[in-house]
Amino acid sequence: MRFDKTLAAAAILGLTSTPAFAAFDINPLATYRHSENFDESAAEIVVFDSQNERFFVVNADANTVDVLVLDKTTFSLELDDECEIDLTAVEGDDGYTLGGPNSVAVSNGRLAVALEDANKQADGRIAVYRADTCDLWDSYRAGALPDMVSFTPDGNYLLSANEGEPNDDYKVDPEGSVTIVELDTDNVTQVEFASFNDDKADLIAAGVRIFGPTATVAQDLEPEYIAISADSSTAFVGLQENNAVATIDVASGAVLAINPLGTKNFNTPNNALDYTNKDDRANIVPAPLVGMYQPDAIATFQRGRNTFLVTANEGDARDYDGFSEEVRVEDLTLDPDLVAAYPGFGDDDDLGRPKTTTVDGDIDNDGEVEVVHLYGARSISIWRANRDGSLSLVADTGSTLERAVAEQFPSLFNATNDEDGLDDRSDDKGPEPEALSIAEIDNKLYAFVGLERSSQIAIFDLSNVNKPKLVQLVNNRVNGALGPDLGPESVIYIDAVDSPIGVALMAVANEVSGTTTVYTVK
């Protein structure tokens, strides 16, 4: 029988995660446009320094860190003429040539910037500046392509996730790594994964995706993002392409575990999805597919003695000139029993449409795919960090995000972020939850989640770790106008006590529109 989406949709009719009321009164206050160049990553990562009342924003289009202040009279965002971050000041440091900034973090009067080399496969740098004068403080060698930088909560350590991406022809593939700087002593530890090279077969069997051509484990692991426990002792490092998270002891630099995240079953009512962009509508249905979590941003929070991890399950594929895993389902060699059960797998308008991988799903190694894997889980998940370094899945938001956008902003459902038109991304990771931050507001914990493609900010109440609840969708995108804000790459919450205007704020850096927007949160 053909997979009947109409019947499947009827089976889940009435299920909704859309909140009946908004938890907060959130309104745009000010927007700064970093560039007139569209879709050039002019606003990527935003942080706020409450001591100096400055926003620092990575502008990859101009290869700068833009410094913004909020005018308290006009409530406009403006460039701070008294502060200029000179990234070129690091050049010449042991042969380093500036490529560009990827991430920023601020703590205790220090601003840290992750800088890649002009040769992306060469070692990058972590540059540290005074947050008050913007003068260079110090710089430290990192691994290849430092993609994210973070201070520990106590401010004693500085870490970077060094992705170590290959070049386009896949002939140069540096090792992924994590750099740990002890700031009081300037001691630098390069955390490497070479000790796991002999465990390659075991890691693959456990579910860690290691599949680059001729790559060792250390070459294949690509650290993407870092979240640190509240006590500053443990770093959780997202390995997005590998669908895994590494647990690292900060003080020693020891890798405690490499945790595969597994897959999500989309063939249940709660996990339903829209998997095709061929019908130009929202059609969220169970389907015989699984999703790899593959988080981008991750964050931690504490409950009693337990540390929990929140992941924004964006998904990502390796797609290079020299090697690509990405194909459509219809192009796979599928197990005949799977096609017999679901003939739609052979139809480009149906189950044959989604983007998938050539790497996973051949369970019995007979050259035929029995389980079709998609990139990302279209959700956020909560994981408990166990004392042995492993992670246990506690909760997942299922199809909440797709349903909420379909119901509240139907013209933006699974839209892409660089052109108008609903349903463009249903075959390819859906809304793409990417940005993430955690905030405590009125003694309750919330997750702020940026949907990279449809461009909303989703807010979840995390009071019940077993059942995170969507309480609000914030939208600053108008269909037909391509903006004002498109492609939220990062989001932060600023408490009223730290705010320059005494009102709680939310700041969002939008890479496609090249805008940073500040909202009031009441």
Image (spheres, rainbow, N blue to C red):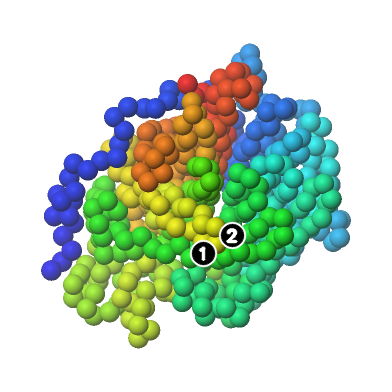
In percent of the image, x 64 and y 16: which residue is there?
A: 72
Which three-letter amino acid code belongs to the residue tagged 2?
A: Thr
Q: Nearer the viewer, residue 63 or 505?
A: 505
Which three-letter amino acid code belongs to the residue tagged 1?
A: Asn
Residue 245 appears left or right of 159: left
Q: Position of residue 497 (x, y in %)?
A: 61, 22
- Picture layout, residue 305 above or below residue 289: above
The residue lying furthest to the top in this view is: 73
How many C-alpha atoms fall within 10 Å of the one at disc 1: few (<14), some, or many (≥20)? many
Mark 1–mark 2 contact, CB under 8 Å? Answer: yes
How many C-alpha atoms fall within 10 Å of the one at disc 2: few (<14), some, or many (≥20)? many
In percent of the image, x 19 and y 48: which residue is there?
A: 12
Q: Position of residue 521 (x, y in %)?
A: 49, 24
Residue 457 appears left or right of 322: left
Alpha carbon distance from label 1 to label 2? 8 Å
Secondary structure beneath label 2: strand
Q: Nearer the viewer, residue 369 or 482?
A: 369
From the image, tell me which residue sits under label 2.
247
From the image, tell me which residue sits under label 1.
259
Secondary structure beneath label 1: strand
- Residue 67, quarter of picture: top right
Q: Position of residue 504 (x, y in %)?
A: 55, 24
